[in-house]
Image (cartoon, rainbow, N blue to C red):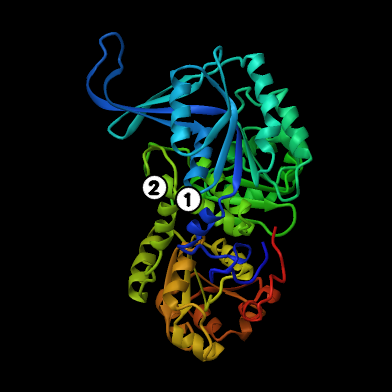
């Protein structure tokens, strides 16, 4: 998709950097054809009350009151893709049993094409039933498929060419049950090895190494899977991201991928591309103990966004937002287009006053967290902005972005600016996972705000030195530090606005 402005007046997705509320609907309108191949499961969520203990053993008795079933594993990825607007086709193996029937019924109800979902009478559909009471999961029963019948594997292998042809993307969900063993893996590698350049291949596997020959566009290991790939023990907490980034080249080599995205649960994700800069996202976690499948939602949203030509870093941020949505839901759930749009819209009008912000930061400091402050117009978001905001976040624990008011932007940039009003600018910036708080200032410099908030680090992006900044004296007066971050001149807002006004395409592409 070319750069510039689309016919409906919205920026082309290939140029989109921020997470505007209209973006999920626009992605759904693209409606890319996506196949999900892999391990299809049924998740059960049974809940009830506990009033007594079992007489035979020191175990509680749960009187089951509610039974809910939902597609799990590769089926959950497919359900999320369909909910976000993709045209989804699935290929896998299920049993000709009650669980398989329920799984297929729910996939069909969601609009998923199950024509290549092989049913076999000697196959047991993998089922995972969680027993909970009072919001706490007590036990999980797994009824696994066991050895996959040879005839079922041959049938799935025969279906592979039809499954992957003419698709914008193919997602391989390999959880190690044996469904994607030989001869299915061989057929997938053979067919997708000859894929068209525009066909996206995403591998979400417990062990992505057997798929290295595919040279997938993306692989998405979680922290445990990345640790096994690296043969090391990852530290707990936020330090994991730095260790993963440090070993990024090894992850790329072992998976054969063009980019690796390591999901770190409460610590967000790390993107390691073969070329270009790494990128972080930060999760907005909740205490919900029954949420499951956020990783499937992440993979689905990431795949949809990339298949629709959204830049990779913006796709990552969108996927993180979708995962943040589903962790608020109990059980195995999906994030749909409208819900994701409402979530992004919720960041509108979230700019805090300086006094409100000061109270929030006081609480963060009481927990030993360091505050980073940066400021700017952020009129039309571009790669230079997102890169340096990610860098700024990593200088501390809490990132505050102070936006120039509209009047302030006009004084700085001229009467034709800002392109976007401060409410829109604040909503887009606040939706970035690396940003914790947004505020607005109307003074010639942010010095009064700096003196009130006293950030441990003041970050500035541009071709400056600390000595050139008027803010440096104010920061150093209370013991703070000034940090100068990357500046990408060719991606400046001024240059981007000029290209749009001239009707030109993108000058620099991003994989």
Q: CA distance from mark 2 to mark 1?
A: 14 Å
> Residue 21: x percent and y percent?
45, 62
- How many residues crowd mark 2 within 10 Å: few (<14), some (14–19), many (20+)? few
Q: Check disc 2 and report the residue beneath it.
A: 286
Earlier along the polypeptide chain: callout 2 or callout 1?
A: 2
Question: How many numbered tags mark residues here?
Answer: 2
Residue 57 placement, left or right of 313: left
Question: Which one is in front, 66 or 132?
Answer: 66
Residue drawn at x 33%, y 68% is: 359
Q: Quadrant of residue 113?
A: top right
What residue is at 60 percent from the left and 68 percent from the top? 388
Residue 436: horizontal and vertical position, in percent?
45, 63
Residue at the limit of the structure toward the left, as seen here: 51
**Position of residue 302 measured from the top left corner of the image (x, y, whole percent):** 57, 49
Image quarter of the N terminus: bottom right
Residue at the spot x=45%, y=72% of the render? 424
**Mark linked to residue 322:** 1
Q: Tell me what residue is drawn at x 65 percent, y 34 percent.
A: 163
Disc 1 crowd, CA 10 A, few/some/many (<14, 14-19, 20+):
many
Secondary structure at badge 1 equals helix
Residue closer to the observer: 72 or 470: 72
340 lies above or below 105: below
């Amino acid at each position: 998709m070319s750069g510039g402005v689309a016919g409906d007046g919205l920026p082309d997705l290939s140029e989109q950097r921020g997470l505007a509320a209209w973006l999920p609907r626009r992605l759904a309108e693209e409606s890319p054809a996506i196949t999900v191949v892999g391990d299809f499961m049924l998740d059960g969520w049974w809940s009830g009350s506990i009033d007594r203990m079992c007489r035979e053993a020191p175990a509680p008795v749960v009187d089951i009151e509610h039974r809910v079933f939902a597609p799990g594993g590769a089926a959950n990825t497919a359900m999320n893709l369909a909910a976000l607007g993709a045209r989804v086709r699935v290929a896998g193996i299920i049993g000709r049993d009650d669980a398989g029937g329920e799984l297929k019924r729910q996939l069909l109800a969601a609009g998923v094409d199950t024509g290549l979902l092989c049913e076999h009478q000697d196959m047991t559909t993998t089922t995972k039933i969680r027993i909970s009471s009072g919001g706490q999961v007590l036990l999980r029963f797994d009824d696994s498929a066991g050895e996959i019948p040879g005839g079922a594997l041959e049938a799935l292998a025969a279906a592979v060419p039809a499954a992957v042809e003419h698709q914008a993307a193919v997602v391989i969900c390999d959880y190690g049950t044996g469904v994607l063993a030989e001869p299915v893996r061989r057929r997938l590698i053979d067919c997708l090895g000859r894929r068209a350049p525009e066909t996206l291949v995403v591998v979400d596997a417990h062990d992505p190494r057997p798929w290295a020959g595919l040279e997938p566009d993306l692989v998405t290991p979680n922290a445990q899977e990345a640790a096994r790939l690296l043969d090391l023990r990852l530290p707990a907490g936020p330090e994991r991201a730095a260790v993963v980034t440090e070993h990024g080249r090894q992850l790329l080599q072992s998976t054969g991928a063009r980019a690796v995205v390591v999901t770190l649960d409460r610590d967000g994700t790390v993107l390691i591309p073969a070329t270009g800069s790494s990128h972080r996202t930060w999760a907005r976690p909740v205490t919900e103990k029954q949420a499951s499948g956020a990783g499937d939602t992440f993979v689905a949203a990431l795949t949809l966004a990339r298949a629709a030509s959204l830049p990779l870093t913006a796709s990552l941020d969108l996927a993180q937002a979708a995962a943040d949505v589903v962790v608020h839901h109990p059980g195995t759930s999906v994030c749909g287009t409208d819900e994701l749009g409402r979530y992004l819209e919720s960041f509108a009008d979230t700019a805090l006053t300086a006094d409100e912000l000061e109270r929030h930061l006081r609480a963060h400091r009481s927990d030993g967290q360091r505050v980073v402050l940066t400021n700017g117009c952020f009129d039309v978001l571009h790669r230079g902005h997102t890169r340096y905001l990610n860098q700024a976040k990593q200088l501390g624990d809490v990132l505050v972005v102070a936006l120039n008011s509209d009047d302030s932007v006009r004084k700085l940039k001229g009467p034709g600016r800002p392109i976007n009003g401060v409410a829109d600018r604040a909503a887009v910036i606040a939706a970035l996972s690396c940003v914790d708080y947004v505020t607005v200032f109307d003074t010639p410099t942010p010095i009064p705000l700096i003196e009130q908030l006293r950030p441990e680090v003041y970050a500035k992006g541009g071709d400056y030195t600390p000595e050139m900044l008027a803010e440096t004296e104010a920061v150093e007066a209370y013991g703070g530090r000034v940090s100068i971050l990357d500046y990408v001149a060719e991606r400046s807002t001024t240059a981007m606005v000029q290209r749009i006004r001239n009707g030109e395409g993108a000058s620099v592409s991003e994989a």
